[in-house]
Amino acid sequence: MPNDTASDDLPESEAEWRERLTDEEYEMLREGGTEPRGSGEYLDQKADGTYACAGCGADLFDSETKYESGSGWPSFWDAVDDDRIESRPDTSLGMERTEIVCARCGGHLGHVFDDGPDPTGKRYCVNSASLDFDGDQ
């Protein structure tokens, strides 16, 4: 079930975002950074639970949709709700990709590709630093 109790007090300035987030979270979420391949905290995470936006706390992905993509980043074949993630064209680095951001706070999460498993065929490739994990108790 999606988290409807995400933090209501979103920062109103980049200075406030810098205070709220770690340096790594800020780089990923606010500057569109990418953590080095294979380095993310949640890459090999296998516990049951929910992955939320590290910026605002909105639930984004469920562990049931996480899979081993071999890409070097945590990958999911679906979001908890399509309304939680926005897609944007990304032509940086001379490539045509689709960036994904948190619909609530606009934080950069990673990219989505059309080479994932059934039933969606999607691979949501996400930076661990853009996520918080809440394991099932």
Image (cartoon, rainbow, N blue to C red):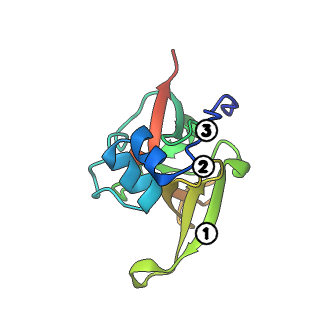
Circle 2 sits on which residue?
105
The answer to whether mark 1 and mark 2 are in CB contact below 8 A is no
How much space separates mark 1 and mark 3, taking CA atoms?
19 Å
Which badge, 1 or 2, is on the more N-terminal residue?
Answer: 1
- Crowdedness of circle 1 by 10 Å Cα count: few (<14), some, many (20+)? few
Circle 3 sits on which residue?
58
Total count of labels: 3
Q: From the top left corner, tell me how far across and down residue 51 is, in percent.
A: 52, 37
Outermost residue toward the bottom in this view = 94
The answer to whether mark 3 and mark 2 are in CB contact below 8 A is yes
Looking at the rendered structure, the secondary structure element under dot 1 is strand
In the image, residue 57 sits, relative to residue 121, either above or below, namely above
**Amino acid type for the residue under numbered disc 1:** Arg
Mark nearer the viewer, 1 or 2 = 2
Circle 1 sits on which residue?
88
Which badge, 1 or 3, is on the more N-terminal residue?
Answer: 3
Q: From the top left corner, tell me how far across and down residue 54 is, in percent.
A: 48, 40
Looking at the rendered structure, the secondary structure element under dot 3 is loop
As drawn, the label of residue 4 is none
Task: Tell me the residue at 44%/49% (across/down).
Answer: 15
Who is closer to the viewer here, 130 or 47?
A: 130
How much space separates mark 1 and mark 2, taking CA atoms?
14 Å
Task: Tell me the residue at 38%/35% (across/down).
Answer: 45
Looking at the rendered structure, the secondary structure element under dot 2 is loop
